[in-house]
Image (cartoon, grey):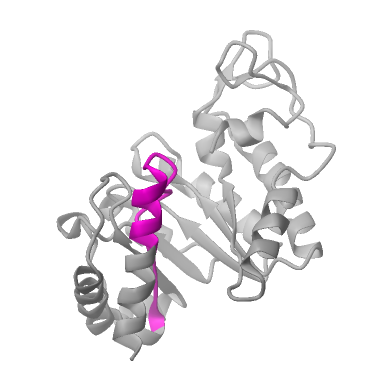
Amino acid sequence: MIARFTTSIPGYDVSSGRSAIFQKLGKFPEPITLADTLLARELAGGRAEVKAVLTGPTTLALASVVQPGAHYQGNDDPDLVHALADIIASEVAALVEAGVRVVQVDEPAFSGGRADIDLGIRCVNRIAMEAPLAVLHVCGDVRPVFGTLLRADVAVLAIEGTREERLPPLNRQTLEAAGKKLCLGCVDSASERVESVDEVKQRVERFAERVGVENLWVAPDCGLRPLSRAAALGKLTALVQGARALAD
């Protein structure tokens, strides 16, 4: 999720295996994720809407190495985070021009304790301005920052849900007061074990009772790329069938 962007943004050098910044960043000459997103939409064949997923500027910045003499003071330099936000916002604009409606910004760094959350939210808001429907995804333990995440100018807030002991207080009133829907992780992206349809259905039911079924989206906890193809497809199948069983 880092290299997909840093290999394309002028000013990065990835030849050493690290995302190293050696000069002031420039905008990419061509959209980075557009071809992949359009391919996914073609494969969906109208059966489902495709959500574009982009790595957020704070996570990109903190995963970068700023070389001596580069334009920025370090990987937490606000100028760097703002520059990356402008670059990602340009990517969103290209996706929207191609007909993409839903755009998700992934900021796992928000739950890691190193990020300037207020700066990060301002930069997410900059990106969200370009999207008809914006989603902010933050995995990990979001309890310390959940109140701040609710202030983001996004329609949907996506968090992990399979480790329920780490969930912040969730209820309909809190979400609706913030003008948010909740996208809850209902299958574990860190385990090869494929959840049963009934397990997913029960998890979705519990949270639907708390926040209202109309306020709930369901998803994997995070990206499924680290898993085997069989496990990833099994989890997605259980997720869809579990949600449908509740709807029926």
Q: Quadrant of residue 213?
A: bottom left
Q: Which residues are magenta?
A: 215-236
Horizontal side of residue 226 vs 24, given as left or right:
left
Considering depth in this image, is 163 or 83 the residue closer to the camera? 163
Q: Residue at x 69, y 37 (%)?
A: 83
Q: Which percent across, then down, holds residue 78?
A: 59, 35
Residue 75 drawn above or below residue 58: above
Residue 38 visible here: yes
Q: Residue at x 20, y 74 (%)?
A: 198
Residue 210 drawn above or below residue 194: below
Q: Residue furthest left?
A: 165
Q: Residue at x 43, y 48 (%)?
A: 223
Q: Residue furthest top?
A: 68
Residue 220 visible here: no
Q: Which percent across, then down, holds residue 203?
A: 22, 71
Horizontal side of residue 184 vs 98, given as left or right:
left
Q: Quadrant of residue 196?
A: bottom left
